[in-house]
């Protein structure tokens, strides 16, 4: 049975199509990444899958239950870490977990044992009786990961689990998630706009842009599909026609004033490219990563000014 | 419906409200002191301007201040749910398998505890101040305050569930709390009011709470305690009904 299946799932706010017809099938035990810039519709999609938002149209089945007709059953099957911190800062870490356990109707006798277990998992035993107000951003996120796992969900949603954390803490959080995936058998759905994170962690990745899936595959295949290495060139009068006719050049794109060539075996062919190109002011060769994959499918860089706009949209929607 | 599940959920939501209440000491202090300021300063001020033989004004307004604690802290506590939306704690609650009805009653119970602790504490102070209480008038006052708190907190929860951000929070005090308080007859007798204002006071649920409290504490009222209690109970039922509906349609 698939953990998650959606058919033409849509969410519109007036004119704005936040999620615009998503078809998705995620298998049991998969670590599935949703990758896209801020405002692409990742959070809206998660909100619908977790029953907090009603779809405008389409179907979503989570753990075998329809999110619209059996929201209670769906909610019993899932755990979630929200993009924004959602623990109560006036309560201690332990109290936050206790509340969660009670709301999920865990047997009273087992509650303390289970809290102990998840606290150990995220390394927070020593600070469990401090109020959350005194936690750092990373600790709070770890607490919320522990909380999401407390009732042993079949499917675990993580919405930008590392957003707003410093690089070291980010690394730390991903280590925890990876360790979790190995220890506990469950399906993990994670959204992120950090390429390198998705690449390392996920079995499969869906690239989302403007509410639609533009590509879906394993990270390796996605990267492979861009066609070899990337050579960036800059110059006033480059011989583009000649470059294009070279057999090992698979495509040319203009990105931020530079020409990006998809090249087979760039290491061997670079000399010929340079001599064909003419007067080159700048050259850079790199193996493609997911950023290039995103560029390949959408024609845009993921980290561009649209990022800020998307972020502001998210903020206004959230408030 | 699984009773254990509902009870545990109610307990969890209640526990959270109560813990937050005990940790926000400034809120407790201000909500207990505010009615006392009114009682001493306003009561003395206006009382001294009353003609001799008009009765003790401070005694007259004491039931009004019991109701005042409920109106201010109860309604605010209910509407405080908009803050839960803001800090995203509400998401954590709504994603659990608890029904929206359970969430509504859990929140209401938590806020009830806060408001009742404060108003019952004022009752005690009233005894110290020499308000002529009897055992039965204390118990009946507690009953009335309980029923009244339930209705006002439900009203607060309803308002909070419709609000999208805490920015509009201040409007509640101007357009809901003060009208309810000022029209309730907490500060003045309602007998000689112009017709239109009398009508407004009759529409205010707090009028019946204040009148009922006066009936048992001071023995002077326009309606009997039982009649007042029934009106406030009716208000409760409507508010709880609307409240559970409002929670079911509440969006984040």
Image (tube, coloured by chain):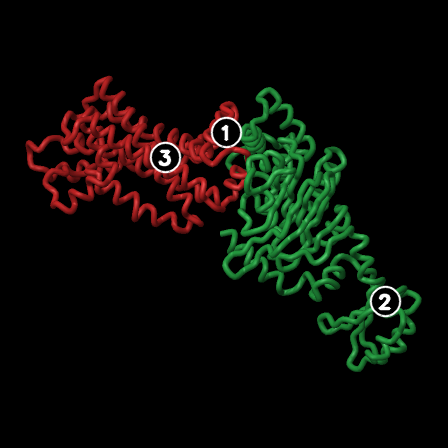
The location of residue A181, given as percent across then percent down, is 74, 38
A35 vs A1, nearest the viewer: A1
Q: How many marks?
A: 3
Residue at horizontal 64 percent and vertical 49 percent from the top: A7
The location of residue A128, given as percent across then percent down, is 60, 31
Residue, disc 3 = B240
Q: Which chain is green?
A: A
- How far apart are the alpha carbons under marks 2 and 1? 60 Å
Crowd rating for badge 3 (residues with CA inside 10 Å; few <14, some 14–19, many 20+): many
The location of residue A90, given as percent across then percent down, is 50, 36
Query: Looking at the picture, do discs 2 and 1 lie on one chain?
Result: no
Q: Which chain is red?
A: B
- How far apart are the alpha carbons under marks 1 and 3? 18 Å
Mark 2 chain: A
Give the residue at the far right of this rendering: A268
Q: Residue A250, relative to residue A81: is it above or below? A: below
Residue at horizontal 32 percent and vertical 39 percent from the top: B72
Is the Cβ of the residue at disc 2 closer than 8 Å to that at disc 3? no
- Asked whether residue A316 appears in the rendered view, the answer is yes
Q: Residue A21, relative to residue A239: is it above or below? A: above
- Asked whether residue A133 appears in the rendered view, the answer is no
- Residue A152 in which image quadrant: top right
Crowd rating for badge 1 (residues with CA inside 10 Å; few <14, some 14–19, many 20+): many
Residue, disc 2 = A263
The location of residue B209, given as percent across then percent down, is 24, 32
Query: On residue B9, which mark appears?
Result: 1
Horizontal side, residue A108 vs residue B129: left or right: right
Residue at horizontal 54 percent and vertical 28 percent from the top: A102
Horizontal side, residue B55 vs residue B126: left or right: left
């Amino acid at each position: 049975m698939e953990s998650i299946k959606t058919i033409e799932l849509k969410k519109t706010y007036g004119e704005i199509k936040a999620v615009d017809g998503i078809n998705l099938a995620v298998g049991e035990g998969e670590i599935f990444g949703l990758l896209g810039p801020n405002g692409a519709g990742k959070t809206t999609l998660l909100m619908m899958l977790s029953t907090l938002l009603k779809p405008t149209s389409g179907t979503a089945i989570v753990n075998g239950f329809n999110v619209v007709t059996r929201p209670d059953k769906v909610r019993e099957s899932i755990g979630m870490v929200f993009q924004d911190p959602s623990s109560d800062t006036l309560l201690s870490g332990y109290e936050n977990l206790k509340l969660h356990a009670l709301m999920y109707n865990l047997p009273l006798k087992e509650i303390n044992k289970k809290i102990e277990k998840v606290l150990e998992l995220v390394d927070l035993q020593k600070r469990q009786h401090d109020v959350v107000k005194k936690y750092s951003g990373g600790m709070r996120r770890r607490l919320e990961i522990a909380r999401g796992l407390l009732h042993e969900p079949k499917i675990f949603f993580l919405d930008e689990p590392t957003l707003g954390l410093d690089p070291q803490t980010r690394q730390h959080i991903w280590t925890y998630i990876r360790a979790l995936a190995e220890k506990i058998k469950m399906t993990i759905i994670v959204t992120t706009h950090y390429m390198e994170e998705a690449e390392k962690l996920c079995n499969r990745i869906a690239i989302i842009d403007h509410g639609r899936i533009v590509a879906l595959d394993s990270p390796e295949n996605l990267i492979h599909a861009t066609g070899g290495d990337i050579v960036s060139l800059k110059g006033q009068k480059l011989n583009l026609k000649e470059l294009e006719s070279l057999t090992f050049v698979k495509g040319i794109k203009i990105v931020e004033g530079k020409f990006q060539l998809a090249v087979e075996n760039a290491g061997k062919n670079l000399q010929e490219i340079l001599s064909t190109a003419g007067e080159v002011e700048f050259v850079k060769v790199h193996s493609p990563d997911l950023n290039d994959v995103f560029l390949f499918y959408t024609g845009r860089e993921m980290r561009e000014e649209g990022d800020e706009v998307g972020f502001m949209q998210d903020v206004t929607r959230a408030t | 419906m699984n009773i254990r599940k509902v009870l545990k959920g109610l307990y969890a939501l209640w526990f959270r409200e109560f813990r937050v209440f005990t940790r926000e000491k400034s809120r407790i202090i201000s909500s207990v002191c505010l009615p006392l300021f009114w009682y001493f300063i306003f009561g003395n001020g206006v009382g001294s301007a009353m003609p001799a033989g008009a009765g003790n004004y401070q005694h007259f307004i004491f039931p009004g201040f019991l109701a005042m604690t409920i109106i201010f802290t109860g309604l605010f506590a209910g509407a405080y749910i908009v803050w839960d939306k803001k800090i995203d704690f509400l998401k954590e609650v709504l994603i659990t398998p608890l029904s929206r009805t359970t969430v509504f009653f859990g929140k209401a119970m938590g806020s009830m505890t806060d408001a009742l602790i404060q108003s019952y504490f004022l009752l005690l102070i009233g005894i110290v101040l020499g308000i002529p209480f009897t055992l039965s008038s204390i118990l009946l006052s507690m009953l009335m305050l309980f029923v009244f708190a339930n209705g006002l907190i439900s009203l607060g929860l309803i308002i909070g569930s419709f609000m999208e951000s805490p920015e509009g929070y201040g409007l509640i005090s101007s357009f809901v709390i003060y009208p309810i308080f000022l029209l309730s007859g907490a500060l003045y007798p309602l007998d000689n009011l112009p017709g239109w204002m009398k009508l407004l006071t009759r529409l205010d649920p707090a009028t019946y709470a204040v009148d009922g409290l006066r009936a048992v504490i001071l023995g002077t009222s326009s309606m009997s305690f039982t009649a007042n209690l029934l009106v406030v109970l009716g208000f409760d039922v409507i508010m709880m009904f609307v409240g559970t509906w409002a929670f079911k349609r509440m969006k984040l």
